[in-house]
Image (cartoon, rainbow, N blue to C red):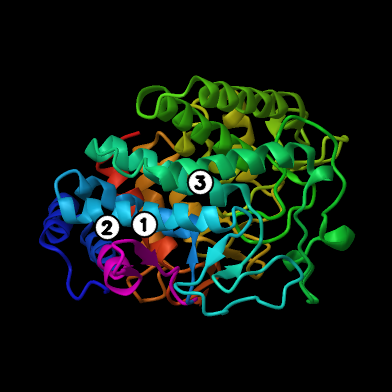
Amino acid sequence: MAYQEVPTAVKNFMQTITEKCGTAHADWAKNFNACFANTLLTTIKRLPDETTFVLTGDIPAMWLRDSTAQVRPYLVVAKEDAEIAKMIAGLVERQMQFICLDPYANAFNETANGAGHQTDHTEMLPEIWERKYEIDSLCYPVQLSYLLYKATGDTSHFNATFEQAVDKILAVWETEQHHENSPYRFVRDTDRKEDTLVEDGVGSKVAWTGMTWSGFRPSDDACIYGYLVPSNMFAIVVLDYLREIFTTILPSEQKTAQIKQLRDEIEKGIKTYGVTTSETGEKIYAYEVDGKGSAKIMDDSNVPNLLSAPYLGYCDADDPLYLATRKVITSKENPYFYEGEYAKGIGSSHTPPEYIWPIALAMEGMTTTSKAEKERILNTLVACDGGTNLMHEGFDVNNPNNYTREWFSWANMMFCELVMDYFDIQIQK
């Protein structure tokens, strides 16, 4: 069943944020409370088997990526509230079940109802809404399971389902280091090139790098060059999580050796092939590469992106290579960076030109060390909410009343996480 009212522990936390905002930032508190409650009341459903299904918002399906980001801020409440912790554990179990069903799928139905993109030319099942393979879809559930353990000390979700899902994840990532041997194909009958893979569903040709291939970006848009650098960064972070889990909680020398080898190969691949040069000749991270010399200089709003590298835990916020990259991707050298009358930030090929994303603005805030910059971004987000007190997918930098997606829970919770970050309320890693 869905939440009928906001739990007391959540209300108490909302009150804490309201008090911290005070009169100076009362508008932050208003939006925080609206967003923080909205996700619980409109997207989260506890199922009879004690698992949790989380709608992305205005699409009747659960994304592995979005669902993690949607509940992540509740981890600070889960420390004190067993019911919230149980809800998150139920989501981890549901996510791992879905990965066991098909590790190449990115979004799932609540039941085997055949909803979604069943006409896509790939190996669809009635439980699957969409089967766009994205590295981050496998990273996020591992991240959530680890953060839940760190927040609560509970290890019960590291069960047989978890172990089976991890085996599937490792197998896919190892397979996709050699994409030419992959069984995965994806073709959609569409005029929108971002929604399908070239070369009869295989994707553009790549060479060995040590990195693992991704068909699609976290935007659900197709990769151009195949090796998506920020998603490989995220893979390294969660592989480190897994190495800790299989060292201290589920001891397995064989598994930890497998994890370490994969992690080190991906890391070497990023260092060797994932760095390019900007227009001014500075070394920066590429967004995508193919291992054959091609590199894409850009960043997208959806996380993982290059902007999010310190947030994910891949590097420090003052890392020189990251700072050089950040400078480029928050400039016109990034084709998806837009600046207008009301705001500036990173947009996406997924939304119209001149639209920037609250998710990217929140990430820009959470990866700066400047308190003043965090404040500026929070003020911008509130001022550009289209009068709804909620966040959206993207909005027009010259008219924030023009936006996409009225109901987009991921963006709401990223705003909440930035407010928490401003007041030094951190999710334990």
For the point 41% across and 52% down, the residue is 377
Task: Check whether the beta carbons of the residues at disc 1 and disc 3 lie within 8 A of each other.
Answer: no
Mark 1 or 3 closer to N-term? 1
Marks 1/3: CA–CA distance: 14 Å
Examine the image and state in which quarter residue 179 appears.
top right
What is the magenta range? 36-59
- Badge 2 amino acid: Met
For the point 32% across and 56% down, the residue is 90
Q: Is residue 278 magenta?
A: no
For the point 39% across and 46% down, the residue is 144
- Badge 1 amino acid: Leu
**Residue tagged 1:** 91
Side of 298 where 97 appears, left or right: left
Q: Is residue 51 magenta?
A: yes
Marks 2/3: CA–CA distance: 20 Å
- Badge 3 amino acid: Ala
**Residue tagged 3:** 165
**Quadrant showing the N terminus:** bottom left
Q: Is residue 424 visible?
A: no
Q: Position of residue 231 (x, y in %)?
A: 61, 42
**Quadrant showing the C terminus:** top left
Q: Position of residue 397 (x, y in %)?
A: 55, 66
Marks 2/1: CA–CA distance: 6 Å
Classify 10 Å Cα crowding around label 3: few (below 14), some (14-19), many (20 and above): many
Above or below, 112 relative to 135: below
Front one among 186 and 175: 175
Mark 2 or 3 closer to N-term? 2
For the point 63% across and 61% down, the residue is 220
Examine the image and state in which quarter residue 229 appears.
top right
Task: Check whether the beta carbons of the residues at disc 2 and disc 1 lie within 8 A of each other.
Answer: yes
**Residue tagged 2:** 87
